[in-house]
Amino acid sequence: MVSSNALAAEHLSVCKNDLLTRWRGLVRADARLPDGRLSFTNDQLDDHLPALLESIANCLHGEQVVEAGIHEAGVRHGTTRRAQGYSVTQLIWEFSIFRKLLRETIEQLRDRLPPEGLFQAREVVLKLTDQSELGSVEQYVDEARQERDDAREQVRKADEQKDRFLAVLSHELRNPLASIRTATHIIQGGHPSPSERQRALEIIDRQTRYQARLIDDLLDINRISQGRIELKPENMDLRQAVQNVIEAYQTAIQSKSISFRFDAPGHEIAIFGDSVRIEQIVSNLLANSLKFTKSGGSIEIVLRQEDSDAILSVRDSGAGIDPSKLTTVFDIFSQAQAGKSEDGLGIGLWLAKQLVGMHGGVIQAKSAGLEKGTEITVKLPCLVRASSSRAIKQVLLVEDDPDQRELLAIALRDIDADIVGAKDGSEAVAACRGRAFDVCILDLNLPDISGYDLAAHLIDLHVECRPVMVALTGAGRPEDRARVKAAGFDHHLVKPPELDQLQRIITQSGNRAIE
């Protein structure tokens, strides 16, 4: 006589294909499930369910079924469904449809099985189906738990990034403040010669502009939160940048009785870089050497040009670097991690590496070992200058304020520029009739026309040779810069403009990269 379980197993085997066909139809017709299910093949839709039916039938036949295998098959099913866009609710609902059809199939044996046999068969079916569903749902729970852990790790890293930024900011602010305080002391505390007073004022001016740049960085919250620093590159002399840094550190060098030497060619070494950040690189390298070089030691800065590269080396006779740490010397906080409090936070070299990389250069460290000095070498691409076809630049200056227009015109005449002034858009258009300009400097707030509209009109008037377009505005937010760029301007200057920068734009008016 056939047992109740065996009869249920045989019935499931006979009805298997019909059960799966009905299940596919119900699933494809159910709008509560993902739309992607409509493009699944039968095998994709069924996934492990045919094998689950076979395991249920084998168990009813009295064969040993490893429940762990059913659970693992459920885990794989959950992983697949998650990748196919199912939510955990949709996964459970899909299983409920399958379970309902299984119960209906078993209930078809109600007239052929005794109540206890029907109950036992139903228990086997539900137990193994639940085991499979549990594995599928657990996969969602495990992945959700992993996502939670990943989110916590991201928060931890963001918090660490914030702390690092504050440390870097403190480092960047402290150096210029020290120079400003020293220069102020020279002016107020004694009787400096005219040349000393002038030098101190130049240092204060340069370091104040440097700090203003850092404040600009603070205003761009999005850039800071993502750890990005925006460069403002221009044609510059690397040799002059190095000299500026050396000048700022003269007092510190003399106070430690350091033997210092600067070896550089007699001509400029032109690069395309952010002058503030380039000086920051040199400053960090020199500050690092001063920190680790004892009184009476030596520091040498060598600057040279090799083919199309500028090579800057900062050598010292200081503490040196353990050869095992040469690969991590540019890691942030690497010195603090060494456990020596006198080593500082280790921010300077890390920051220098980031800035060098942003300029398309490379930086490396060499040391023969502890107490044998260190050499940090920076390689930056040199600027290939384009020859200018005109000695005198033709400049259109559109500014409705007569005082600002006159002062700017006077300042720009120092660079052999022919300045034509205009108080509004109408005068600017009239000035362009029969005359071409190399550079057009436009105030964006004019009495008769928007500076954006005037820019488009002036570009149309210069059909044969498009001028370099410079926007003068009091708005300096990132969205303002984006709007200026979209309007066709090549340069964006916030009032009052830096005269040196404006003069460079005019003298190098072939460069039209937005600044």
Image (cartoon, rainbow, N blue to C red):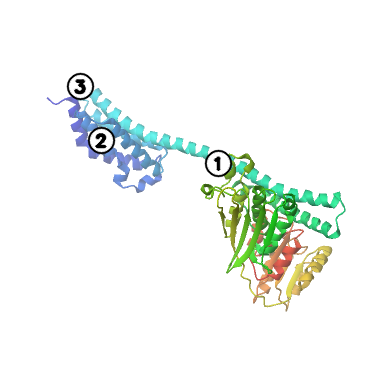
**Where does the C terminus fall, quadrant-wise?**
bottom right
Q: Label 2: state its secondary structure.
A: helix
In the image, residue 379 lies at what x, y percent? Answer: 58, 61
Indicate the quadrant where residue 159 lies: top right
- CA separation in Å, label 1 and label 3: 64 Å
Query: In screen coordinates, is 328 left or right of 61?
Result: right
Q: On residue 114, which mark appears? A: 3
Crowd band around label 3 with a 10 angstrom C-alpha radius: few (<14), some (14–19), many (20+): few
Query: In screen coordinates, is 451 left or right of 93?
Result: right
Residue type at numbered disc 2: Leu
Residue at the disc numbered 1: 157
Q: Nearer the viewer, mark 2 or mark 1?
A: 1
Crowd band around label 1 with a 10 angstrom C-alpha radius: few (<14), some (14–19), many (20+): few
**Where does the N terminus fall, quadrant-wise?**
top left
- The residue positioned farthest toward the top in the image shown: 116
Can residue 399 be seen by looking at this rendering?
Answer: yes
State whether residue 297 is above or below residue 31.
Answer: below
Q: Residue at the spot x=28%, y=39% of the render?
A: 22
Indicate the quadrant where residue 462 lies: bottom right
Residue at the disc numbered 2: 53
Q: Residue at the spot x=86%, y=59% of the render?
A: 194
In the image, residue 43 lies at what x, y percent? Answer: 29, 45
Residue type at numbered disc 1: Lys
Query: In screen coordinates, is 264 left or right of 27?
Result: right
